Each structure stands twice: as structure tokens, then as C-alpha cells.
Amino acid sequence: MSERLLDVFASNGLITAFAAVGLLMLVCNLVSRQLTAGRIHGSAIAIGVGLVLSYIGGVSTGGEDGLADVALFSGVGLMGGSMLRDFAIVATAFGVDVEELRKAGFNGVLALFVGIIVPFFLGGAIAYAFGYTDSVAITTIGAGAATYIVGPVTGTAIGASSDLIALSIAIGLVKSISVMIVTPMVARTISLNNPSAALVFGGMMGTTSGVAGGLAATDPRLVPYGAMTATFYTGLGCLLGPSVLYLVVRALLGG
């Protein structure tokens, strides 16, 4: 009976993945409310648990796709892929009031460029301090400091090794989780309490998942605004990383 049930779950991988992630989010949200009083958002806890499960799945099967290598959870690979991710981002953006978006104006645009350039060069400087002197490595790591999407996109475009791309993803994940945790703690101090502020905040931070999780713990009504500019941030970063920023790094390092 149990084998037949497992076969049903495995043959309906995507449905099983949604159910598993839903159950994980339920548990993590309970942990967030009961143990942290909502200060650490359930999404941040879920990401941490997901990374541990992915590691266990990869080690136990000897595969390269983490938990998706386990037959029962093969649908996680599709659910966590770029198609559904981009769909979720676009769906979130539909909650934006265009009039509020216009209010951000120049500040929103400036936040996007500052939010990309500052972490990029900070990440690149840290990489250089740790002994990386190749322009491809520094650019890839710096792009990862922007987001864990910009990092691998940039690295792939300029021919970075898989180790560097993995490192850029890890850096971006640390940033995403940090933004989720810190946002509700500092929201009152930085007056993050209105759509315009959320637009600028999303442009400065850039990590869509981190901004969405942090704003959800602060005020769910602000999520669409922060997610909107964070999405623009990702697109702009993917354009600038392997082109302008890479050329700047090459010029600074002398080729």
C-alpha cells in the first residue's frame, strides 16, 4: 500500500512539490510566529530549511540537483525553475498601483543604479581581497553580491567556471536571507511605511525574494511595490553585469 502511494506521489511530481512546499511553509510560518514573534519571516526560515534538504538530497543520491534528485520530489526541479519563478514575479507586479509607481520617479531610477553598482563593487573588492585577480571571477562574484540571479547570468555570459557561479549564487542567497530578516527590524527607523518608500527600497536591495519576504513581515500591502522595482533591478543587473560592469572591471585590472 505504501509503495503504491509513493508511486502516485512520484508520478505526480509537480503536485507533490506544491504540497511539500506548502506544508514546509506552514510549519515555518508557525515557527516564525511562535519562536520569533514574526521578527524572522517564515520565508527566511523556509529558505534555510530548503538549503539543508537540498544538501541532504544531493548527498544521499549523489546527484547534482539537490532534493529534485530524489524520485519522490522530482517535481521540485520544475517548481523551482525559472518559468514558475518569473510567473510569480509577474503575478506579484500586477498588484502595483501605477500612480504610486510614478511617484517614485527619479528616486526610484537612482535607487536601481545605486543598488546595483554599490554591492557589485563591494563584492568585487572583497573577492580581490581574498585573492581573486581575474576580471571574470571578480565580475561574477560582484554580480552575485547584487542577487543570486544576476550572478549566474553574468558568470555564464562571460565564461566563468561552475565553482565561481556557485559561489555567486551562495553570496546572493546570503543577501536574500539577510534582507528578509533585517527589513522588519529597521522598517520603522528608515520610514519604510508607504508605497514610495517600498519602491525605492526594492530598487536599492534588488533581491526580489528577500524584499518580498521582508516587506511581507513588515506590511503585506507594500510587497507589490518593492517586488516591482526589485524585478527591474534583476533585469537591469543582468544587462549591466556582463557588459558595462565587466568592461569597467577589465579596465581597472588592466585587461
Image: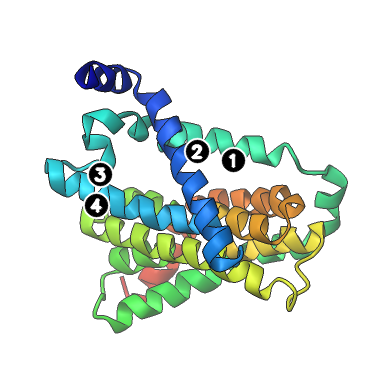
Q: CA distance from mark 3 to mark 4?
A: 6 Å
Q: Residue at 26% of width from left, 29% of height from top?
A: 72
Q: Amino acid at mark 1?
A: Ile
Q: Residue at 73% of width from left, 79% of height from top?
A: 189
Judged from the image, the secondary structure of the residue bearing numbered disc 2 is helix
Q: Quadrant of the C terminus?
A: bottom left
The disc label shown at residue 85, or none:
2
Q: CA distance from mark 2 to mark 1?
A: 6 Å
Q: Residues within 10 Å of mark 4 (few under 14, many from 20)?
A: some
Is 80 drawn above or below residue 117 in the view shown?
above
Q: Quadrant of the N terminus?
A: top left
Q: Residue at 26% of width from left, 23% of height from top?
A: 6
Judged from the image, the secondary structure of the residue bearing numbered disc 4 is helix
Q: How is the image coloured?
A: rainbow
Q: Amino acid at mark 4?
A: Tyr
Q: Position of residue 134 (x, y in %)?
A: 26, 70
- Residue pushed farthest left? 62
Q: Are marks 2 and 1 in contact (CB under 8 Å)?
A: yes
The disc label shown at residue 66, or none:
3
User: Counting residues from the N terminus, which is met first, the one under dot 3 or under dot 4?
Assistant: 4
Q: Position of residue 97 (x, y in %)?
A: 83, 44
Q: Amino acid at mark 3?
A: Gly
- Residue pushed farthest front? 1
Q: Are marks 3 and 4 in contact (CB under 8 Å)?
A: yes
Q: Residues within 10 Å of mark 3 (few under 14, many from 20)?
A: many
